[in-house]
Image: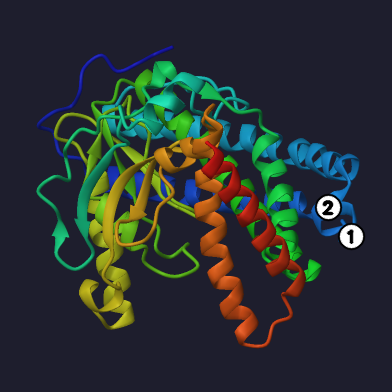
Amino acid sequence: MTQPSTTTTGQALTPAQMAALLALVQAQARVRQQLTATAVAAVLMPFRALSGADWWNSGKVSAAIRQALMIIQPAQRNAVALTDAYLARTATIMTGRTVRPAGPIEVTRIRRRIPADIVEQLVAEQRRPAWIELGDTWDGPADTIDDDPVWAVAEQEMEFLPPSHAYGRVADAYRWQVTARGDPPETAQGKAIARLTVVAQTDVTLAVREQYRRSLGQIRADGYRRILHPELSETGPCGLCAVAADRTYRTGDLLPLHAKCVCEVLPIYGDLDPGLTLNADDLGALYATAGGTRRELLRKVRVVLAEHGELGPTLINGDQHYRDPIEVARTRSADKRVRDQAQLDALLEIHDISRHRADHGENLTRSLRWQRERIAELQVALRKG
């Protein structure tokens, strides 16, 4: 493979090179979005066909999951091939040398699982999940935006979940919604479809992110920057990404993600950081067209780089509840008391919500009875020790 052995530090990119990079970024984002949308629509079909009773039938749920994987994995492979070629082309433009694609990553090893021994260390709070304040959408980057995270679970310690796991978890959630929360089957089905949409979108994004890391390392970039695409977002400018775009990353770092993220990346070689210019131009034009400013069009969001036990580096709103690896670890601990306490805490919260819903006219008699019985069982078990 032909690779750049030196950077072009000190040399500015020409207007023609910048235009070529912009065209590549836009094409990559557009094609990736189309590919993802097509795959997601197909993934949802076997689950939409499930009746209320089918969600309780393990054979039918497993068949739907198999169909989903037969759709999403080819989509992931197409997305990583597209991404690999895209980064090779950007490197060729920026270095003036022909750079070939690095080759695809393995798409079946992208969702993480915290090893059992680290689960117990998290429960004991011997390890703490990463948490870095990046800034907010009104006041801009924080002083800590370039701090290096210390991950609770290092890369070399991580295990991987089977590709089917996230889809099976949606079926578990459907049954929980009906049993514990008292949702009608059609409501639970709607929530399941919404969750499946995010799962399938995230599967493609995780594969692309892992390909970023492989390709950026092979093309010998010095780092990279996320490239915003507010025009592709369903809700306009994303506050999480707008703040995070002020941070640069080393080539070995995984890009922090969030649900429905539409960002791409561009490499950095020495002083050549075209993403900085493209991001400023993109958001500036968008705000000007909308007739407002960054402060007016983005609600104030406190942006944090956090650690997710399954997805890795994640962007979150620091003012909202976030289910971090410690909270997840408590549900997986080998200590039954820890697991029971975690379930009791969750059920007490659900019970309060259900009572409020019942007070406003919903018929939740069966669910409330189930909740009370299960809460009592857990309280007895915890008292016995």
- Residue 225: tell me if it is visible: yes
| Disc 1: which residue | 51
Tag count: 2
Q: Of 224 and 363, which appears nearest the observer?
A: 363
**Residue 249 in which image quadrant:** top left
Nearer to the camera, 203 or 314: 314
Q: Nearer the viewer, residue 352 or 2?
A: 352
Q: Looking at the picture, does residue 35 appear above or below residue 153? A: below
Q: Is residue 112 left or right of residue 55?
A: left
Q: Is residue 361 above or below residue 63?
A: below
Residue that appears at 58% across and 66% down: 351
Query: Residue 354: where, in percent of width, then height?
Result: 61, 72
24 shown above or below 317: above
Name the outermost residue toward the bottom. 361
Q: Position of residue 346 (x, y in %)?
A: 53, 55
Q: Residue at x 30, y 72 (%)?
A: 298
Would you say residue 41 is visible in this rendering? no
Amino acid found under the numbered disc labelled 2: Trp
CA separation, marks 1 and 2?
7 Å
Residue 365 circle label: none
Q: Residues within 10 Å of mark 2 (few under 14, many from 20)?
A: many
SS under mark 2: helix
Q: Which residue is mark 2?
A: 55
Looking at the picture, which amino acid does disc 1 mark? Ser
Is 98 situated left or right of 43 in this image? Answer: left
Q: Are marks 1 and 2 in contact (CB under 8 Å)?
A: yes
Helix, strand or loop at label 1? It is loop
Q: For this view, does 97 lie left or right of residue 43?
A: left
Residue in the picture at 49% in, 46% down? 28
10 Å crowding of disc 1: few (<14), some (14-19), many (20+)? some
